[in-house]
Image (cartoon, rainbow, N blue to C red):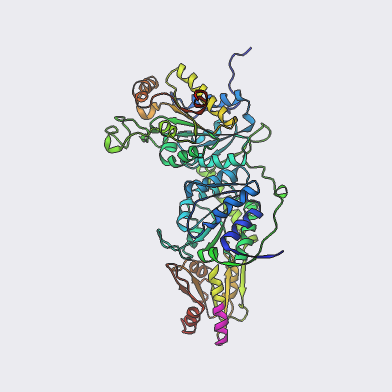
């Protein structure tokens, strides 16, 4: 008996992601979680603009490809037509935390019953390594060649910000820098999706990922960078969970 | 059916609901705010969804999502807000998704003014957003037509799987007229949308709503296909009104509210012995070129005069259609000002 099988929620198309990038891992976690929840046939995904722009080729669901930053608005429209479908957005940091900040914040404030998987690797990968809204202080990018400093402004903390909003049901930050964290990410992603099935409202999981290519590091060093440099600025954990608030009340 | 006295904006909103629109996403802007106000109260009555979006950009992308999921969806705005929607409109056009967009034009450019204008003709007809695409554009001339063409717009959008725009102006949006509203549609009778997102059960092909075609040949093939569709639309959907054109020597060209002012001027001019007529494009795309060509070829036609609430936008299409066969003059007002029939009559009588 097989103890492991590839989820049917991923197509057989090979990922285009760079060697060592953890996008592929997160794709698998999302696909597996949806299979385990038993709602594959009722799922609609919304892909972003950025490295995961071809996500519709990999996720074996009905898929939409949104304009840059607009995935939460598009997902809102889809969800309102099909309230019984599971609608998720898969978005990078430039997409979600820069050009689409308004769409993100207001989807949360509406308590929109959708799930967002937010990939934070602190860089614009697809366009060649420009500074992202989440590039950490001191980190080099092609548009802050000497490293991010005060003149570039400060990196945005999405989970912390959304946690202050009444409409947000669940916001957690997880990481992919080691196996234990990957398993933890899977738990959080599954919870965020389950929240939607239970009609609880807006859930977001921010996943810290790497970019060996544009960070100019080996895959191993890039994972170490997440642990040593990124997490101190972007701490892991639950920033808001109305389940816990109910329990504690 | 009974006639009702209602505002243009409300007629558009109610006609949309009756045509099966159950998803409306909008943002307040003068002079169209009655549309979202009306929809916020009306859509819940019929089990529909109204969302006041955080921006025009979000509103059009909510339309994109709802329409991609198979709903009849609409947004409305006025000129500056329509500029913000252009990104989404280009994506919707490039994804073969049907929807309806209403522009109740006000004076631009920039923040401009809140009085009526026709300054968005180029934006509506020539693309507006990036890339090669078209919208079907209806230009109603009365509150009745605003209702009728909004009703029709959803069917035409579905038929060709593309965005359709209702282009009217602040005057039409704000004025009240007697209207006979079209009947409420039975949603179960609307055509099925096999292409729409709904969750894939593994049978047949899964559905992907997408405007990305990264291979140049694939994108070119797609654009060629789009333009073949637009050729079909030119054949099937062109609508135009000819008013007292048969013996006319001077032919006005105008659309929307301005066409009604032209009609008053024509009656005045005819009393003065000047044989004037009007060609009123009802569809701005497709543009009724053949009607202009037909009259341009007539010996007794002396000239055409385009009349617009702009510095002259549609006049360029009139010139293209007339193709140098006859002179094409222009009369326009901007800033939110509206000409009257005396202005036009003396412009023509003065030999301009």
Q: Residue furthest top?
A: A1
**Residue A197 in the figure: left or right of residue A152:** right
Q: Is residue B108 above or below residue A217?
A: below
Q: Is residue B160 above or below residue B291?
A: above
Looking at the image, which residue is at 69% across and 55% down? B184
Q: Is residue A188 above or below residue A56?
A: above
Q: Is residue A195 magenta?
A: no
Q: Is residue B271 magenta?
A: yes
Identify the magenta region.
B264-273
Who is closer to the viewer here, B33 or B116? B33
The number of numbered discs placed on residues in the rendered structure image is 0
Q: Residue furthest front?
A: A249
Residue B270: where, in percent of width, then height?
A: 57, 84
Who is closer to the viewer here, B115 or A246? A246
| Main SS class of the magenta portion in the image | helix
Residue B35: where, in percent of width, then height?
A: 55, 56
Looking at the image, which residue is at 47% across and 68% down? B309
| Residue B262 visible (yes or no) | yes
| Residue B125 visible (yes or no) | no
Who is closer to the viewer here, A214 or B136? B136
Instruction: Point out the image quarter for the N terminus of chain A.
Output: top right
Residue A118: where, in percent of width, then height?
A: 46, 31
Residue A84: where, in percent of width, then height?
A: 63, 35
- Residue B283, picture quadrant: bottom right
**Residue B84 in the figure: left or right of residue B231:** left
């Amino acid at each position: 008996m097989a103890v492991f099988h590839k989820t049917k929620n991923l197509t057989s198309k090979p990922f285009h992601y760079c060697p060592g990038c953890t996008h592929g891992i997160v794709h698998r976690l999302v696909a597996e979680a949806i299979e385990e929840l038993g709602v594959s046939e009722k799922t609609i995904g919304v892909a972003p603009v950025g490295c995961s722009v071809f996500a519709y080729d990999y996720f074996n669901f009905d898929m939409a490809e949104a304009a840059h930053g607009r995935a939460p608005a598009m997902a809102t429209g889809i969800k309102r037509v099909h309230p019984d479908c599971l609608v998720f957005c898969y978005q990078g940091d430039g997409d979600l935390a820069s050009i689409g900040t308004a769409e993100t914040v207001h989807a949360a404030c509406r308590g929109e019953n959708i799930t967002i998987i937010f990939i934070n690797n602190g860089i614009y990968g697809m366009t060649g390594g420009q500074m992202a809204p989440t590039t950490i202080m001191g980190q080099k990018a092609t548009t802050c060649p000497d490293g991010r400093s005060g003149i570039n402004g400060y990196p945005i903390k999405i989970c912390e910000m959304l946690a202050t909003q009444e409409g947000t049901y669940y916001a957690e930050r997880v990481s992919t820098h080691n196996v234990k964290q990957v398993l933890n990410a899977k738990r959080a992603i599954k919870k965020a999706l389950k929240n939607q099935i239970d009609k609880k409202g807006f859930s977001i999981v921010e996943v810290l990922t790497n970019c060996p290519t544009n960070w100019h590091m080996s895959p191993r060093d890039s994972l170490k960078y997440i642990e040593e440099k990124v997490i101190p600025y972007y701490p892991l954990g639950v920033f808001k969970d109305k389940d816990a608030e109910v329990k504690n009340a | 059916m009974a006639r009702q006295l209602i505002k243009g904006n409300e007629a558009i909103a109610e006609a949309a609901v009756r045509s099966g629109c159950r998803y409306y996403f909008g943002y307040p802007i003068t002079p169209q705010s009655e549309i979202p106000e009306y929809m916020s109260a009306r859509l819940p009555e019929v089990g529909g969804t109204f969302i006041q979006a955080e921006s025009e950009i979000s509103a059009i992308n909510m339309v994109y999502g709802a329409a991609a999921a198979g709903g009849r969806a609409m947004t409305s705005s006025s000129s500056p807000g329509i500029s913000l929607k252009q990104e989404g409109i280009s994506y919707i056009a490039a994804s073969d998704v049907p929807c309806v967009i209403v522009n109740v034009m006000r004076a631009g450019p920039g923040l401009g003014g809140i009085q009526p204008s026709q300054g968005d003709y180029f934006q509506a007809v020539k693309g507006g957003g990036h890339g090669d695409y078209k919208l079907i554009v209806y230009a109603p001339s009365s509150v009745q037509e605003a209702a009728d063409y909004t009703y029709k717009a959803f069917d035409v959008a579905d038929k060709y799987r593309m965005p359709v725009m209702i282009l009217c102006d602040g005057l039409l949006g704000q004025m009240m007229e007697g209207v006979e509203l079209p009947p409420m549609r039975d949603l179960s009778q609307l055509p099925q949308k096999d292409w729409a997102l709904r969750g894939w059960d593994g049978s047949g092909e899964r559905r992907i709503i997408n405007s990305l075609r990264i291979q140049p040949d694939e994108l070119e093939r797609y654009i060629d296909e789009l333009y073949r569709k637009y050729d079909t639309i030119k054949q099937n959907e062109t609508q135009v009104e000819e008013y007292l054109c048969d013996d006319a020597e001077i032919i006005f060209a105008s659309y929307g509210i301005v066409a009604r002012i032209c009609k008053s001027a024509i009656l005045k001019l005819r009393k003065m012995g000047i044989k004037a007529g009007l060609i009123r494009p009802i569809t701005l795309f497709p543009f009724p070129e053949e009607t202009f060509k037909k009259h341009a070829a007539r010996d007794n036609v002396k000239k055409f005069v385009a009349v617009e609430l702009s510095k002259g936008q549609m006049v360029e299409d009139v010139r293209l259609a007339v193709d140098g066969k006859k002179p094409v003059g222009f009369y326009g007002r901007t800033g939110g000002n509206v000409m009257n029939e005396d202005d036009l009559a003396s412009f023509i009588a003065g030999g301009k």
